Image: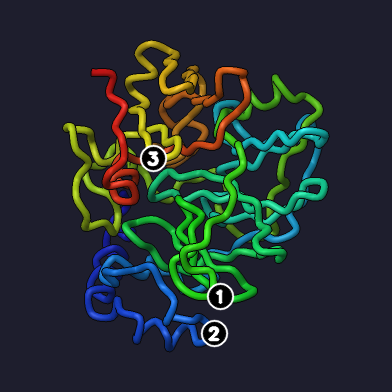
Amino acid sequence: MRLTVLITAFVAAFASAAYANPDFWRHEWPQTDFTQTTIENWSEVMSGGPPKDGIPAVFDPQFIPAGDEQNIGLREPVMTLEIEGQTPRAYPIRYLTWHEIVNDVIGDLPVVVTFCPLCNSGVVFDRRYDGRTLSFGVSGKLRDSNMIMYDRETESWWQQALGIGIVGEYASEQLTQIPAWMESWEEFTERNPDGLVMAQPEYRRPYGQNPYVSYDSSHRPFLYSGEEPPHGIAALARVVRVGDRAWPVERIRDVNEITEAGIRISWAAGQASALDTRSIAEGRDVGTIRVRDQAGNDLPHDIMFAFSFHSFFPNGDWMLGQ
């Protein structure tokens, strides 16, 4: 990781140690109801550096035909959404790396597409809750290195990896996760030649570049002080989370496909890591994971780092095949 990122981490960690409590955050978030929260240990909440909306979420994204896209490398990762009756859509990680949240509507379905680079967590949720359609932004806060989102309607805080409210009116409430997956641009276009891809946002960002160079080969997560994963699993090893179970990607890669607990998980080469080299397109091959039930239907899941699974699912099941 770059020296500037490390310096930012040190400064943020120092500030967080002094100010990570609800009284401090109330000054920055006067509209948030801090009397409602699931957080027991406020030292877990840190500033990631940028302020509220300092990482700008995308609203009303524009799309172009997949065949018209000329800038995305074939191996670059995209988040794929294939909703029945709608044209498949790809959300390039080259954009999500710099925006982390995209609020979109597909047909009649309002969705929020999210990616937390520090946890490699890429998940999509239905934005509807309790009769209201929420719109999400980036709070600038982290909890155990995972992005805290907020909704603009109530300024409640939400844990990105879980889709669960942690502070405010929606504390303890959970969004519905929608089946989506991360795959290479080439895989998306081969399956969906007439699909749509999110157009480049109108911001000045070095799209296609990774600001966390060599992050996923580091020994320690960024802004994380929790426990290491058990079973000798590296903190930044990728795991497939389905519910409260985690399968190490390395185990699946070795055999290409595993069927356990009524779930079929497959691995195929060809997708670049978004957190390796400076150019995302040149990242090492981490492969594409697909998760389906016995009938072949795609299931909600996440490809997250092992430390993040252990943090949010301390009693989760590690599917080690032993």
Contact, mark 2 vs mark 1 (Cβ under 8 Å): yes
Q: Amino acid at mark 3?
A: Asp
Look at discs 3 and 2 and give the one toward the viewer.
Answer: 3
Residue at the image position 64 percent from the left and 74 percent from the top:
153
Asked whether 36 or 240 is in front, the reply is: 36
**Visible residue check, residue 95:** no
Of the image marks 2 and 1, the number of the one nearer the N terminus? 2
Of the image marks 3 and 2, the number of the one nearer the N terminus? 2
Q: Residues within 10 Å of mark 3 (few under 14, many from 20)?
A: some
Quarter of the picture containing the C terminus is top left
Left or right: residue 46 versus residue 290 is left
- Whether 156 is drawn above or below 94: the answer is below
Cα–Cα gap, marks 3 and 2: 33 Å
**Visible residue check, residue 128:** yes
| Residue 31: mark in rendering | 2
Residue at the image position 77 percent from the left and 24 percent from the top:
193
Q: Position of residue 288 (x, y in %)?
A: 50, 25
Element class at badge 1: loop
Element class at badge 2: loop
Residue furthest top as drawn = 255
Query: What residue did someone put label 1 on?
Result: 155
Query: What residue did someone put label 3 on?
Result: 244
